[in-house]
Image (cartoon, helix red, strand yellow):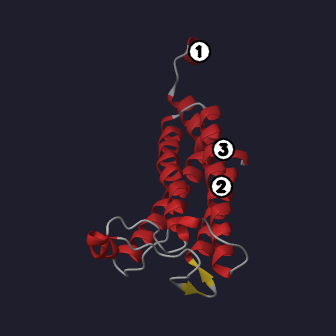
């Protein structure tokens, strides 16, 4: 009777939360994987001193977008947000990570020499300014070439692992959208 007047009872809240659980767990999983991936990237960069190239840095944008969004979606599902908004958010997460995976595949192709990378990844600077400050600028500018692999494990570079992680996040997000609790 109370739900007829727009008041949720404890049973209806529990039922709603149970219906949103797949989306909540999928979003939480995406957020944890994204946070772990970013932590790993920062560990490689800051602790192991493996410097990222420009494409490596661009591949982080998908994680910077998808990870906090997924965390907000998990919180929204926990609080009982409208399922349509949660699905739309998971679609955005999936699209961001598909794009990120495609960028990782492109970067892997550059590393394997299948195609050329962007001009900004060549590892050389064009304009050094005046001759007096040339040495100062040479010390300050260090562009890591995108076609040189900094680290490989089991034949895959970090760009290759980015493709796999991005696709796993896509599958998880889509799973949260389509899974129906019985």
Q: Nearer the viewer, residue 148 or 6?
A: 148
Q: Give the vertical position of 135 relative to 17 (above or below).
A: below
Which residue is denoted by mark 2 in the rendering?
Answer: 99
As helix, strand or loop, the secondary structure at mark 2 comes to helix
Which structural element holds mark 3?
helix
Identify which residue is drawn at 29% across, 76% down: 135
Which callout, 1 or 2, points to the residue nearer the camera?
Answer: 2
Taking the spot 65% from the left edge, 39% from the top edge, the residue there is: 87
x 54%, y 51%: residue: 66
Dot 3, crowdedness within 10 Å: few (<14), some or many (≥20)? Answer: some
Residue 91's tag is 3
The answer to whether mark 3 and mark 1 are in CB contact below 8 A is: no
Give the label, 3 or 2, closer to the camera: 2
Between the residue at mark 3 and the residue at mark 2, the CA separation in whole angstroms equals 12 Å
Residue 182 showing in the rendered view: no
Along the viewing direction, whichever of 180 and 37 lies nearer the viewer? 37
Instruction: Tell me the quarter of the image containing the C terminus.
Output: top right
């Amino acid at each position: 009777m109370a739900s007829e007047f727009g008041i949720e009872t404890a049973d209806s809240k529990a039922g709603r939360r149970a219906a949103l659980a797949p989306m909540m767990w999928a979003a939480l999983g995406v957020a944890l994987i994204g946070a772990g991936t970013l932590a790993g990237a920062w560990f490689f960069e800051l602790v192991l001193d493996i410097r990222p190239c420009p494409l490596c840095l661009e591949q982080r944008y998908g994680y910077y977008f998808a990870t906090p969004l997924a965390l907000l979606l998990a919180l929204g599902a926990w609080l009982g947000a409208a399922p349509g908004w949660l699905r739309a958010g998971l679609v955005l997460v999936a699209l961001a990570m598909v794009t990120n995976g495609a960028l990782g595949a492109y970067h892997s192709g550059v590393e394997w020499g299948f195609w050329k990378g962007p001009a900004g990844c060549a590892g050389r600077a064009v304009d050094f300014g005046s001759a007096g400050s040339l040495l100062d600028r040479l010390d300050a500018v260090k562009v890591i070439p995108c076609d040189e692999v900094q680290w490989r494990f089991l034949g895959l570079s970090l760009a290759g692992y980015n493709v796999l992680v991005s696709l796993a996040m896509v599958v998880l997000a889509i799973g949260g959208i389509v899974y129906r609790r019985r």
